Image (cartoon, rainbow, N blue to C red):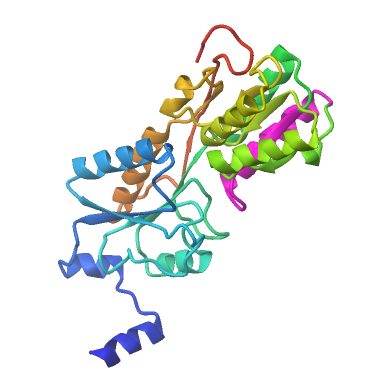
């Protein structure tokens, strides 16, 4: 048996999905690979996935990455224990995604586009449009011109698109892009808080912060509060995603609403279509909308 496994590993053999079905070896299980589950963003994501999977009569396996491991060349979930995978952004190396694709294994990418040339279905938000509308609101309605940006994790496509929207809004109003106003947020409240604290210690001049997500926006609010800065009077703060806690911050957070749970359900539907030999949409792009609360300087809430 050891020699068999050695040969399989050497040859990179993986059973064809259709062959498994014909052999009656369906697992009745779908898998999802996540980088973490502690951030509030993942609550509606997992809820949307779990409901859709259960409604379809499947079981769900969730694997959460080791926090010290950014990417993996292999996965504990795959052809041997699931009928298909949902893969969150950055969780797997492109080489492993290519291997799964070549094995004709059903998968959907969450919040990232596939490697070049691979027609793998993927789910994504209207990140650039939402970010641009948010930053334009700060400029046009509240006359903010020194707007800092807290980036997401390195290599994260959604963060890159949100930065594109930020830059486009600045350009539209003839505000020069200033690299010193861009710092790490990593979609993490602690990282964002430390970045904003460093900005304040250095005496960096800014009158607004666009955080790449709501978690980092909360970190920014904490740093400003500790420094005695008034929000929004001195520094406006806005985020992205509209997680549940966004409306509970002090002041309530102006943000961009992303349909996290609906996108998760759509991803499962695209995965099931592949499993049942149907042709899924290659791109599932979900719209975003501005949610106005008090942290930008507005007095009334609107969505």
Q: Quadrant of residue 132?
A: top right
In the image, is residue 186 above or below residue 128?
A: below
Along the viewing direction, whichever of 105 and 264 lies nearer the viewer: 264
Q: How many marks?
A: 0
Can residue 133 be seen from the camera position used here?
A: no
Position of the N terminus, as image quadrant, is: bottom left
- Locate residue 255: give its quadrant: top right
80 displayed left or right of 71: left
Residue 148 on the magenta span:
yes
Say if 248 sits above or below 54 in the image: above
- Residue 293 is situated, as x and y percent measured from the top left of the image, at 54, 15
Decide which of 71, 84 is in the foreground and name it.
71
Q: Is 274 located above or below residue 220 in the figure?
A: below
Residue furthest bottom in the image: 3
Look at the image and give the residue range highlighted in magenta: 147-174
Magenta-colored stretch includes residue 109: no
Q: Nearer the viewer, residue 25 or 40?
A: 40
Q: Residue at x 40, y 37 (%)?
A: 263
Residue at the spot 67% in from the left edge and 27% down from the top edge: 227
State the residue lying farthest toward the top: 300
Quarter residue 150 falls in: top right
Q: Residue at x 41, y 58 (%)?
A: 65
Q: Is residue 257 left or right of residue 170?
A: left
Q: Is residue 211 placed above or below 255 in the rendered structure?
A: below
Q: Is residue 114 visible?
A: yes
Residue 112 location (% of width, % of height):
52, 49
Q: Is residue 29 left or right of residue 64?
A: left
Q: In the picture provided, is 116 more to the left or to the right than 34?
A: right
Residue 108 percent location from the top left of the image: 40, 52
């Amino acid at each position: 048996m050891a020699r068999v496994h050695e040969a399989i590993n050497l040859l990179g053999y993986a059973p064809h999905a259709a062959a498994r079905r014909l052999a009656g070896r369906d697992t009745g299980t779908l898998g999802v690979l996540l980088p973490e589950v502690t951030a509030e963003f993942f609550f509606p994501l997992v809820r949307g996935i779990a409901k859709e999977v259960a409604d379809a009569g499947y079981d769900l396996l969730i694997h959460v990455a080791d926090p010290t491991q950014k990417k993996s060349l292999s996965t504990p979930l795959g052809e041997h224990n699931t009928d298909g995978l949902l893969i969150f952004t950055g969780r797997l190396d492109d080489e492993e995604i290519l291997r799964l694709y070549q094995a004709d294994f059903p998968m959907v990418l969450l919040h990232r586009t596939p490697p070049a040339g691979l027609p793998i279905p993927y789910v994504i938000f209207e990140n650039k449009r939402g970010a641009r509308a948010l930053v334009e609101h700060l400029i046009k309605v509240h006359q903010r011109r020194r707007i800092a940006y807290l980036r997401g994790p390195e290599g994260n496509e959604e963060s890159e698109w949100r930065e594109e929207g930020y830059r486009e809004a600045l350009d539209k109003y003839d505000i020069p892009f200033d690299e010193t106003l861009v710092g790490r947020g990593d979609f993490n409240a602690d990282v964002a808080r430390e970045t904003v604290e460093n900005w304040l210690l250095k005496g960096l001049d800014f009158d607004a912060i666009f955080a790449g997500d709501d978690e980092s926006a909360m970190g920014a609010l904490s740093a400003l509060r500790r420094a005695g800065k008034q929000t929004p009077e001195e520094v406006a703060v806005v985020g992205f995603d509209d997680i549940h806690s966004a409306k509970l911050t002090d002041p309530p957070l102006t943000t961009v609403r992303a349909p996290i749970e609906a996108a998760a359900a759509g991803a499962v539907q695209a995965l099931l279509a592949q499993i049942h030999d149907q042709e899924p949409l290659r791109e599932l792009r979900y719209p975003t909308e501005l949610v106005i609360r008090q942290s930008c300087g507005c007095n009334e809430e609107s969505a």
